[in-house]
Image: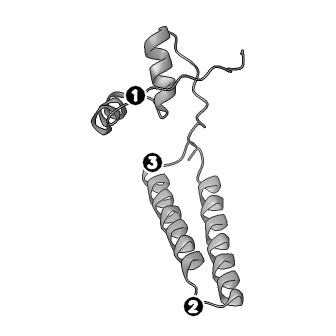
Amino acid sequence: MEKRTKEMKIRLTDDEHQRLLERSQRTHLAEWLRELGLGERTPSKRRKLPDVDPQLFRQIAGTSNNLNQIARKINQMQSLGAEDTIRLLSLLTSIDRQLTEILEQHRDR
């Protein structure tokens, strides 16, 4: 595939931008606009979701999201000492790793 080197900028109002985002069926607005203007579909680079029970996958994804939010808050807290911060982030990393292992064990069931 040829490397894209040309850049095109357009100005939009907030309302126009929001309407384009709502109409877009792609993750990235630029991909959708390129498809629309050129009439060519580009292959998506998105990863294939693992073949696991959708309910389990949603639950683990939600839990992982919560872990990320907790990690963000820990990093923002200045009242914790460095040692406590490292210990908590280590625990969160361990939990995240365990969730990934659970997903792997339940793949293709």
Tell me which amino acid carries mark 1: Gln
Mark number displayed over residue 79: 2
Q: Residue at x 64, y 53 (%)?
A: 104
The answer for how far apart the CA atoms under marks 3 and 2 are is 39 Å
Q: Closest to the observer: 99 or 80?
A: 80
Q: Closest to the observer: 90 or 105?
A: 90
Q: Residue at x 57, y 91 (%)?
A: 79
The answer for how far apart the CA atoms under marks 1 and 2 are is 44 Å
Badge 1 or badge 2: first in the primary sequence:
1
Which residue, given by chain and number where applicable, does mark 3 sit on? 54
Q: Residue at x 45, y 26 (%)?
A: 10
Q: Which quadrant would the N terminus be assigned to in this image?
A: top right
Mark number displayed over residue 25: 1
Which one is in front in this view, the residue at disc 1 or the one at disc 2?
2
Q: Are marks 3 and 2 in contact (CB under 8 Å)?
A: no
Element type at mark 3: helix
